[in-house]
Amino acid sequence: MQVNPYLFYNGNCEAAFKYYEKAIGAKIEVLMLHEGSPAAEHTPPEWMKKILHGRITIDGEVIMGSDAPPGNFHQPQGFSVTLTVDELAEAERKFKALAEGGTVNMPFAPTFFSKSFGMCVDQFGIPWMVICPMDM
């Protein structure tokens, strides 16, 4: 069994996945448009190029997502996607990349439970936490 987050975007899923590919090393596995799918007949013309289903992997872990149907997007709340990065400099680089153009809720800094930890909401509205754990 796998448990994977499924993220909904406000019409910018493709841009987000491509950004994650460039900024944090995600690998895009699927970007399925409404256009050409069985859902196309029920899709407004301006939504045909939007993502019906997408899938990325980050270091082998799966995140899926799509553009929320028109009028159905709600700002994400009550969760964060968490990256655990063992190397401090790489963790800081990924945090800065995710925070770029977004909002930092907690700056990336040492804590009592980690070498460093930070919280942000990326430019696409997705909440993230990045942690560099203490050596075990």
Image: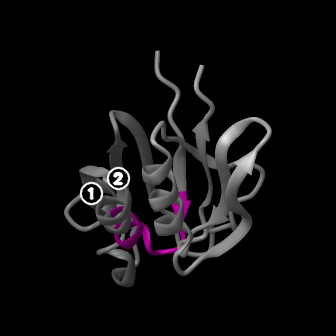
Crowding at mark 2 (Cα within 10 Å: few <14, some 14-19, many 20+):
many
Residue 87 point in image, percent of width and height: 45, 41
Residue 63 point in image, percent of width and height: 44, 44
Mark 1 residue element: strand
Task: Report the residue marked by disc 1.
Answer: 31
Furthest residue to the bottom? Answer: 46
Dot label at residue 8: none
| Left or right position of 12 against 75 | left
Q: Which residues are magenta?
A: 8-17
Picture quarter containing residue 126?
Answer: bottom right
Residue 71 point in image, percent of width and height: 62, 75
Task: Report the residue marked by disc 2.
Answer: 54
Residue lying at 35% horizontally and 53% vertically, measured from the top left = 54
Residue type at tag 2: Gly
Q: Is residue 71 above or below residue 61?
A: below
Q: Nearer the viewer, residue 107 or 4?
A: 107
The colour mode here is one colour
Q: Was residue 15 drawn as part of the magenta stretch in this picture? A: yes
Q: Is residue 76 above or below residue 104?
A: above
| Left or right position of 66 against 28 | right
Picture quarter containing residue 115?
Answer: top right
User: Distance between the Cα atoms at labels 2 and 1?
Assistant: 4 Å
